[in-house]
Image: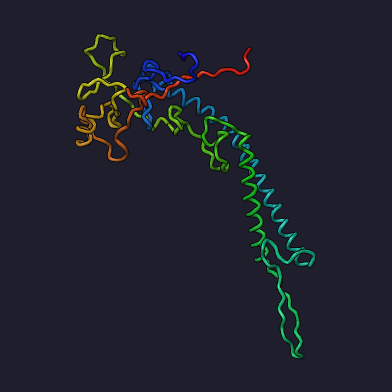
Amino acid sequence: MLGSGSKKERLGRDAMKNFNCCSLCLDRARDPRVCTDGHVFCQECVLNSLLSQKRDIKRQSLLLDRMRATEEQERVLARAAARERVLKEFESAQSGLGSKATVGKTVASTVVVPGAEGRGTKRKFDLDQDEIERLAKEGEQEALERTAVEQAEARRAKLPNFWLPSLTPSATPAAMSEIKLQTLCHAAKPAHPISLKTLTSAKFEEDNSSSEPVGERPCICPICRKGLSNNVKTFVLKACGHVVCVMCVDTLCKPDKACSHCGTAFPAKGAPLIELKREGTGFASGGQAEATRFDLSFQG
């Protein structure tokens, strides 16, 4: 596949997936379904993918529950340690053994009150219980924030999972409550959420005048009867599922707000069209498939 001395090579048209092929099995889609990003799947393939991801999510959810319980225990211990530290600092400041500031706040102050004999007397104003509670809460919150950052950094090496974007080794640390377990479409880069409710049924019109057997005939636009390929931008109509070329969409379907083949009106809410993804558009920059050869070092 690769020439002498070359490291990378752009694959040709024969190595490109057709626009009506499944993104999982790479064969012509049977009972095709389209995700919101325009990737085509066989119904059987996408169901198997979703079921396997849900089984993996079920296993990961048990691990997440244990990690959440551990995180909650660490948070309770951090809150107790922070409260104890604040109270110790306050007691030492009150007894005069430590500094007069606790968590950046003045603990006590003295005021000179002039007396009858011209001599001043010192009166000491101590903090009340409300001030103690406020200082304790500030110390607890500060300790909890430091603990949350430390826990998020420690989780990066504990739970690598390439099925969940928030649990990958390169993901930004986040709180356990922010981690979402959901099924993904891995045909897209980056992967996006997918479910059975978001899939749209697609209907590819075949050219009946072709001599090839049914299921292998080329696809055509049901409106203008023009042949469809990777070089033609195509859309699937959510209302009826017909796959139509861009020319018919712009000149007929969008002005009428309905499918020009069956007359089904566009939905009132949401995007009425989904553009199908294509590999290789006939232009030099269209293909994305490359073959790479890696040489081993220190070969004898």
* Percent coordinates x, y for residue 114 in the rendering: 72, 86
Instruction: Give the left or right position of residue 227, taking residue 75 as reference.
Output: left
Above or below — where is 205 with respect to 246? above
> Quarter-wise, where is residue 174 in the image?
top right
> Quarter-wise, where is residue 42 in the image?
top left
In the picture, the quarter occupied by the C terminus is: top right
Q: Residue at x 57, y 43 (%)?
A: 175
* Percent coordinates x, y for residue 222 in the rendering: 22, 23
Q: Nearer the viewer, residue 215 or 73?
A: 215
Residue 33 in view here:
no
Above or below — where is 204 with respect to 179? above
* Percent coordinates x, y for residue 34 in the rendering: 36, 27
* Percent coordinates x, y for residue 104 in the rendering: 67, 63
Above or below — where is 143 with respect to 165? below
How many numbered markers are drawn? 0
Residue 185 in view here:
yes
Q: Nearer the viewer, residue 226 or 271?
A: 226
Instruction: Give the left or right position of residue 73, taking residue 220 as reference.
Output: right
In the picture, the quarter occupied by the N terminus is: top left
> Quarter-wise, where is residue 206 in the image?
top left
Q: Residue at x 75, y 84 (%)?
A: 120
Instruction: Give the left or right position of residue 141, taking residue 30 as reference.
Output: right
Q: Residue at x 67, y 44 (%)?
A: 73
Q: Nearer the viewer, residue 280 or 118?
A: 280
